[in-house]
Image (cartoon, rainbow, N blue to C red):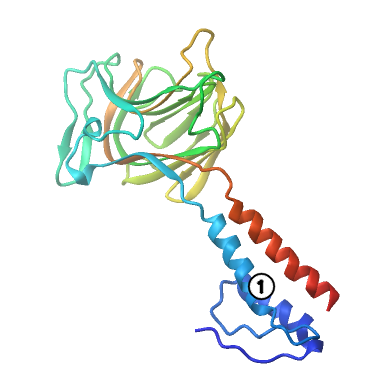
Amino acid sequence: MISISSATPGSISTNMKNTYKKISKLSLSPIKTLRNRSGKALWGSLLAAISILISSSELRAETFYSWNASSGLFPDQVAPVGGSITLTDSSSLDVAFDNELDALTFPDDTSLSSMLFYRLNFGDGSDSAPSNPFENGYAINFEVRIDSSIQTDNRRGAIAVTMRTGQSRYSLSAGIDYVRMIRDFEAGSPVASVDTNGSFHTYRIEVDGVKPGSAIRLFQDGGLILNASTGLLDPGESEDISFGFGEGSGIARGTSQWRSYSVEAIPEPSSALFLGLVSLGSVLFIRRRF
């Protein structure tokens, strides 16, 4: 509960500073009432402005696809919002649930050219398309453990997580104790040396837009491990909007255990943020006058 105490006009500046400190620390300690010379309370306006700012900064991303192994459904049994999902299967083995691990196993069939890869498609992402739901940015979340990885190219690994948003693309590739972000399939792509097989890890890929050169941030278990940027499509490559995950390379193979995968679109900035800034600006203006 927030308690309120009176404050004289001369104590407004001090109380305002104390209030800022408490709010910045997300403290639940009492906040003193701030009053101007006519005795009107300012603390309510300040708290309202801060509340609007906080709520607007926590805009919820729109989930376009969410699969979890605990559901008992295969990824292609979960329909993406406004899209479709298919399985590219050139392997002699099939994906299967491991009930002890609560995960979906992508097995190694000993053939480098085989693929077990789920692809989500959301249609046309070119400049001429009416809209692109991911144009303001998006995030991909997944949880996986890699049990084995054999590759003939250091740009590949047992798992792949891909993105194409009409005008740009990238691919995440991971093997035993490394994760690489690949842009334009270049050899010098950034790589992080992290544990990938000791236990399950959660990953989050945040991308700031759909244009080539958009910033990418890769997190493992909540910690930032790589910075990268999206690359150009190859000449003549389809400008569709698609995402994929699984064993998706023709020059690598391995076994991996997947627990979840999801795709989120970042919404447009809310007008609430503008209103919050205006309200906070008004409070700060009054503070300067009094």
Q: In this view, does 122 lie above or below 196?
A: above
Left or right? Give the position of 204 relative to 29: left
- Crowding at label 1, few (<14), some or many (≥20) Cα neighbours within 10 Å? many
Residue farthest to the right? 289
Q: Between residue 56 and residue 210, name the one nearer to us.
A: 56
Q: Is residue 213 above or below residue 227?
A: above
Q: Is residue 188 visible?
A: no
Residue 262's x, y, as percent? 36, 40
Rendered residue at 59%/72% (across/down):
25
Q: Between residue 37 and residue 59, name the one nearer to us.
A: 37
> Callout 1, which amino acid?
Leu
Rendered residue at 53%/16% (across/down):
233
Left or right? Give the position of 277 relative to 195: right
Element carrying mark 1: helix
Left or right? Give the position of 46 relative to 136: right
Q: In this view, does 204 lie above or below 289?
A: above
Q: Is residue 61 above or below residue 191?
A: below
Residue 269's x, y, as percent? 58, 46
Left or right? Give the position of 132 relative to 259: right
Q: Can residue 241 be seen in this view?
A: yes
Work out which quarter of the rendered image holds the C terminus and state it: bottom right
| Residue behind mark 1 | 46
Residue 110's x, y, as percent? 23, 19
Residue 87: quadrant of the picture: top left
Q: Between residue 156 and residue 259, name the one nearer to us.
A: 259
Total numbered labels placed on residues in the image: 1
Q: Between residue 92 and residue 39, name the one nearer to us.
A: 39
Rendered residue at 78%/80% (across/down):
13
